[in-house]
Amino acid sequence: MHAIVDSTLATFQEVLTGYRAQLQVQEVGTVKFVGQGIARVQGLPGVKSEEVVRFPKDSLGMVFNLDPEEVGIILLDKSEHIKAGSEVRRTGRVLDVPVGKALLGRVVDPMGRPLDSQGPVHLSQRRPAERESPAIMDRAPVTVPLQTGLKVVDALIPIGRGQRELILGDRQTGKTAIALDTIINQKDKDVICLYCAIGQRNSSVARLIADLHRYQAMEYCVVVFASGEESPGLQFIAPYAATTMAEYFMEQGRDVLIVYDDLTHHARAYRELSLLLRRPPGREAYPGDIFYIHSRLLERSTHLNAARGGGSLTALPIIETSAQNISAYIPTNLISITDGQIYLSPNLFQKGVLPAVDVGKSVSRVGGKTQLPAYRDVAGNLRLSYSQFEELEVFSRFGTRLDEATHQTLERGRRVREVLKQPQYEPMTVAEQIAVLLAVSMGIFDNLEIEEIAVTQKNICKALREQLPDLCKSIENGKILDDCDRDALLKVAHNAMASEQKLQHQIDWDAPR
């Protein structure tokens, strides 16, 4: 027993003899002022921009301003316990967030902390929230389409994987609905989706998460949420943190879709922080670098070349306009940064044209090259003819007499508009869209009443899946339609419409007289 004790003491003595304490210099500052979401600190001479600092009770902040006499810090946690005189310590690292596959199916805040009831997120890898965008030589052209499942977008305003397509419109016009349908449509398409909610109400995001669960979309989705009740600093870093999480998957060679909902709240949070930290306001009271905060965010979305893995990051930023003013400061900035925009009109929304996409004011500058050949064959001139119809419809209200050709053009246009309507949560496959668009462009719906078109569409889609499954797969794989394919699609449409008319005739015949 004594031998064991002596051996243990000898071991301890050896360890203590070899131990050399190392001194570390640690900078400690003092809070000078605390405001709504910001703090001004003295005594951190070596602190760096965007470095994380620690307040009492492990509250975090990020260095934002480096002034000669003080440091401006944006708070990333609640600040009730922070007061003048509190200690602030450097951490020596820039703001970083956890990344990895464990995030899939989770709801987290911008710092990677879980907001759902599924326990902690076990991730060992972290990356800076602010990262440089890929170099020009690391990028490749956008060549693969991103199908949204919406006829009006896929046919007229196509989006490619790696593109940045802005969604804008007034309040309550269906902007988030388009993004949500696009996420739901990525099921079984090997696309990972991130939804970044900035300054949204808790109830709205909870309803969206419930919809994602209901349509089995959370399996391939990550929700990053900074609510309107959080500090403006957390709202400001949210899109950058979400993009870093998305870039992890892109650099693994995966295709990723990220939705920023919305950058109006992001711009307001940045303006609030800037004015509190006494940055000079510029046009419309926004700081002069408001353009830069969005450009450095959206430039990170791209399609990488094969040497970098071939992954892609597609961005759908959402912005809110006021009184349909798309030439306002923030919308103009984002229109110039992105590769196109989808404009949602409140006038169309009030008329029940959903999704309320204004085709004349919407454009896709990149996605047209990625569009599947079947779309170009069927809907190549549809955008122009539909825009002409809308102008002709307005003009026709001023006259009482219309010639036969004008009358036919108006009737065909009204049926095209009815076909482009689509209920939420009902995305359509490529083949279904092609069949319906071919039918309306060839005049098959001309003898139908407007109210009958929705039911006829469903019958055509059902018959197509049952009768031509091989053709459906070929169209989705990029097949160019030949005369036989067009005849087969038109035959299905004719038969489906004939069966619907026969059923309707039978119902009318059996009705009591």
Image (cartoon, rainbow, N blue to C red):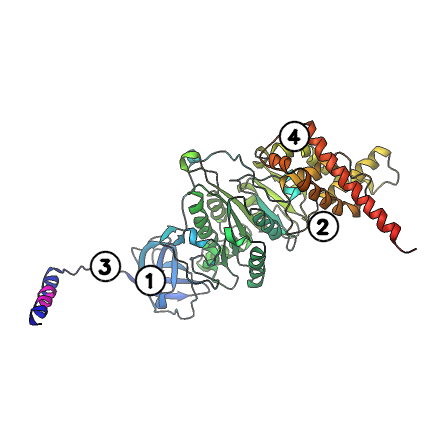
Vertical order, 422 against 278 (above or below)? above
- Residue drawn at 54 percent across, 55 percent down: 265
Q: Looking at the rendering, in which quadrant would you find the C terminus?
A: bottom right
Q: Are marks 1 and 2 in contact (CB under 8 Å)?
A: no
- Judging from the image, what secondary structure is the residue with disc 2 in? helix
Identify the amino acid type marked 2.
Asn
Q: Dot 3: few (<14), some (14–19), or many (≥20) neighbours within 10 Å?
A: few
In terms of depth relative to the viewer, which is nearer, 229 or 501? 501
- Residue drawn at 56 percent across, 54 percent down: 216
Residue 8 is covered by the magenta coloring: yes
- Please tell me whether mark 1 or mark 2 is closer to you in this view: 2
Residue 275 is covered by the magenta coloring: no
Q: Which residue is mark 4?
A: 481
The chief SS type of the magenta part is helix
Instruction: Using the rendered view, name the quadrant where residue 16 is placed.
Output: bottom left
- Please tell me whether mark 4 or mark 3 is closer to you in this view: 4
- Judging from the image, what secondary structure is the residue with disc 1 in? strand
Q: Is residue 141 left or right of residue 180?
A: left
Seen as rendered, the residue at the extreme right is 513
- Please tell me whether mark 3 or mark 1 is closer to you in this view: 3
**On residue 25, which mark appears?**
3
Identify the amino acid type marked 1.
Gln
Q: Are marks 4 and 3 in contact (CB under 8 Å)?
A: no
Highlighted magenta segment, given as a residue range: 7-12
In terms of depth relative to the viewer, which is nearer, 230 or 6? 6
